[in-house]
Image (cartoon, grey):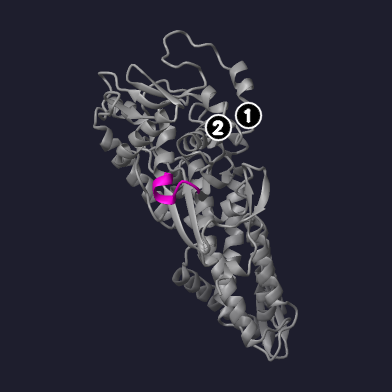
Amino acid sequence: MPLYQDQELKIYNSLSSKKEIFKPINEGCVGMYVCGPTVYSNVHLGNVRTFMSFDMIFRYLKHLGYKVRYVRNITDAGHLENDADEGEDKITKKARLEQIEPMEVVQRYTVDFHNILDILNFLPPSIEPTATGHIIEQIELIKNIIGKGFAYEVDGSVYFDVHKFNTSYDYGKLSKRKLDDLIHNTRTLDGQSDKKNPQDFALWKKAEPQHIMRWPSPWGDGFPGWHLECTAMSTKYLGETFDIHGGGMDLKFPHHECEIAQNEAAVGKSPVNYWMHANMLELNGQRMSKTTGNTINPNELLSGNNDKMSKAYSPNAIRFFMAQSSYRSVLDLTDDGLKASEKGLNKLLEAIAIIDKLITSKTSEGFDISTWRQRCYDAMNDDFNSPILIAELFNAVKYINQIKDGTAHISAEDLKLLSLTFNAFIFDILGLKKEASTTEDNTHKLNSTIEILIKLRAEARANKDFALSDQIRDELLAIGIQLKDGKDGTLFSTN
């Protein structure tokens, strides 16, 4: 029996603003779409946090036994400098500034995006479609929306009629905004816009003579609107209605709101059952911003080549740091926070190295493995609550160290369950890398060094050199290594 039949997963749905029991459209199968990057620059660390959240969600759904089709797009055309259908295409602008082809820009930063995600141990999505690879689908979708009376063409551009749509549907239901309020807070059109109303958004934009990226269409040469691509690609690969749509909190309005409108206009029903939004990543208590200089990119964090952190941090340390906060919470990236996560991570990895060497007993004492295992699932079933999961993992670390020290006992059957559960949540679900060779090698060297010191201390005691004996014990204790003398000799534990 697959695990999902035995576990009740709840997801916070941005559409209803509450946690809901997850029931996929098709038994045992999940369709999930996540808005990917616009590839005109190196991937932003805040975006990495969003993608990492959905990587963990993808991993957990797979772990539960679901067959998951995970679609994450690449935006390689149509994303203008702001969300009001004004300005230059971001990729075209970068190409013009660097005097290269737009597809050179796309290739460079798509490769960078994949490299960073590989380093951070992301699972690849099931499908990674591009906007430029689905121009035909987008044109057909526009024709459908025009045919339903919810879009209009003006001088080679096509706009979605938000006011007309709102007479039959509810524009703003995801972001909890009312059209009347949007109208009130929007500046009047200056007469140079083709739109009927400022709230209307572009489905297709006419390409001016200087615009490099352009495709033929029934309305003339142009390029698709940014919101349109996600509707076209998500519905092509997941159906007119699918289970989960994810992205950053900043995409809720207008991007995701427009996606809902486009789908409802085209097929008459809402496209997604569960909308999920990951929150922002801050740096030292402030919003990341290139203009203020309060920013750091993934490569700088990994290499230590920056003025914000005291050292370089490993991919594992970064993943573990991000998992220690709920995906729906604002996360503040700090040097102290990363150091603390690194210390906690080392304790987890040390416990992993110890598990297989533990001596079993006839019965277990001091810890109920089955109850603990279900608490781990309960944490993830509560809207993927990774901080609570990590707290449960540290409860197990304490127990593992007690078994090692001889103050607790575990049966062979429970040890097997503990090992399987510990490995599954740490590596398969949280996505930490198995660095077994390095970890085990370092642990072996540390243990060997301590054993040498224990022998030297025993010799000092035999020679009645109690000053040296006490010095060895006290200096080891000062760095977190406690010696315990007993009838079977001297044992040690790390704090």
**Mark on residue 253?**
2
Magenta region, residue range: 234-241
Between 72 and 95, which is closer to the camera in this rendering? Answer: 72
Q: Residue at x 43, y 58 (%)?
A: 123
Q: Who comes first in sequence, dot 2 or dot 1?
A: 1
User: Which amino acid is tagged 1?
Assistant: Arg
Residue 112 in view, yes or no: yes
Task: Report the Cα–Cα distance between label 2 and label 1.
Answer: 9 Å
Q: What is the magenta segment's predominant secondary structure?
A: helix
Quarter holding residue 346: bottom right
Between 120 and 474, which is closer to the camera in this rendering? Answer: 120
Left/right placement of residue 345 relative to residue 296 reads: right
Q: Residue at x 58, y 54 (%)?
A: 323
Left/right placement of residue 405 relative to residue 204 reads: right
Between 66 and 477, which is closer to the camera in this rendering? Answer: 66
- Residue 97 included in the magenta stretch of the image: no
Could you tell me residue 30's position as x and y percent? Answer: 50, 57
Could you tell me residue 284's position as x and y percent? Answer: 60, 39
Query: In which quadrant will I find the N terminus?
Result: bottom right
Left/right placement of residue 237 relative to residue 378 reads: left
- The residue under label 1 is 177
Tell me if label 2 and label 1 are in contact, CB under 8 Å.
Answer: yes
User: Which amino acid is tagged 2?
Assistant: Phe
Name the mark nearer the viewer: 2 or 1: 1
Could you tell me residue 100's position as x and y percent? Answer: 24, 31
Quarter holding residue 340: bottom right
Furthest residue toward front = 148
**Mark on residue 268?**
none
